[in-house]
Image: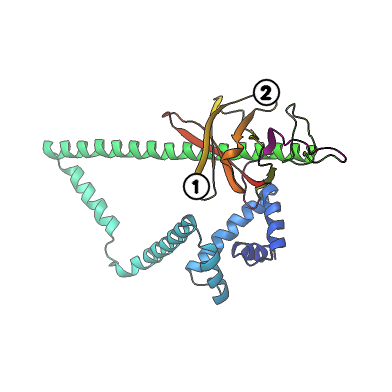
Amino acid sequence: MEDELIVDYLLRSLPADEEIELEKRYMTDDALFERISVVEDELIDQYVKDELTADKKVLFEKNFLTTPARMERVRFARSLIDWAAAQAERPAREPASESRLSSILRAFVALLRLQTPVVQLSFATGMVLLCVWLAFEYHRAEVRYQSMVAEKERAEQNERMLERRIAGLLRGGGSGEVRSPSGENAPAPGPVAGGPAAAPPQFVSVDLVPLVRGAGAQKLVVHRETQFVQARVEVEPALETSSYRTTVSTPEGTSVWSQEVRLAATPAEPVLSVMIPAAALKTGDYILTVSAPAADGTFEGIADYSFSIQLQ
């Protein structure tokens, strides 16, 4: 029954409230997350084997095949099935008296029986080249494996950081409120009964959490005379650097502001405090990207944070 629910989720045919509830579950339930991956693989196999109903096939092509990565997985699954079918048919097409493998083995044995120096030198050279090629392929596979391990560790670090930020937000009653320069929560400025209107704050502050699937942008109301928006983001303490590049861009990828920021770290909570000029922001959605220095001197993105500005 739950597999059918997962299929409907992958095909985007679930009601919105059920879809949101399932996404909340798989963010905290490892078993459900793994089950979704298994059902996704089975759904791709069924599509490649033309085992889906007409309605599900239409939904699969419309709502599932929406990214290059998913299209590549379908192409790979189709190639794998075609290869397996070809391997199954090959014995029937080859003569029973002799297989290709046996021919290769007999030729190899005959080569070894030749004792001329030219043949021995050629064979030795071929073996050396083969060993070099195998060593190169092993090294390349090792590099890919180490890259995957590093990516997995980074994802786990981001997950732990997100859990800590969410726990802190739940304890503090949420984020996005106006703060005083000392860090204490303060009410948003407004007119005082019987007196003149309060002056707008010089800056407003918001604690941002990493961008995750299904999460909406954190909303922040900014007065038009406010000078700065202070975005506070927690970074993973395992990163061996104190200098980061922060970039604010639109969801379409247009950069509106960028600056290098140093880490204001404490043992319990390493935090970047990013002061964004309010004049660079308009009403709309934005993404704050934090990048760390890479080994080649460039900067590599490590986390994205989504927020929304409403000018008043």
- Tell me the residue at 78%/34% (across/down): 185
Query: Is residue 53 placed above or below 178 in the rendered structure?
Result: below
Q: Which residues are magenta?
A: 193-215
User: Please, which colouring scheme is shown?
Assistant: rainbow
Q: Which mark is residue 6?
A: none
Q: First in sequence: mark 1 or mark 2?
A: 1
Q: Residues within 10 Å of mark 2 (few under 14, many from 20)?
A: few
Q: Which mark is residue 253?
A: 1
Front residue of 21 and 39: 21
- Tell me the residue at 62%/52% (across/down): 34
Q: Residues within 10 Å of mark 1 (few under 14, many from 20)?
A: few
Query: Is residue 78 placed above or below 251 in the rendered structure?
Result: below
Q: Is residue 116 visible?
A: no
Q: Is residue 247 magenta?
A: no
Prevailing secondary structure class for the magenta stretch in the rendered image:
loop
* Residue 74 on image: x %, y %: 46, 61
83 sits to left or right of 278: left
Q: Is residue 199 magenta?
A: yes
User: Which residue is tagged 2?
Assistant: 266
Q: Please state, as top left, top right, bottom left or bottom right, where the N terminus lies in the image.
A: bottom right
- Gap in angstroms between the C-alphas marked 1 and 2: 32 Å
For the residue marked with disc 1, what is the amino acid?
Answer: Gly
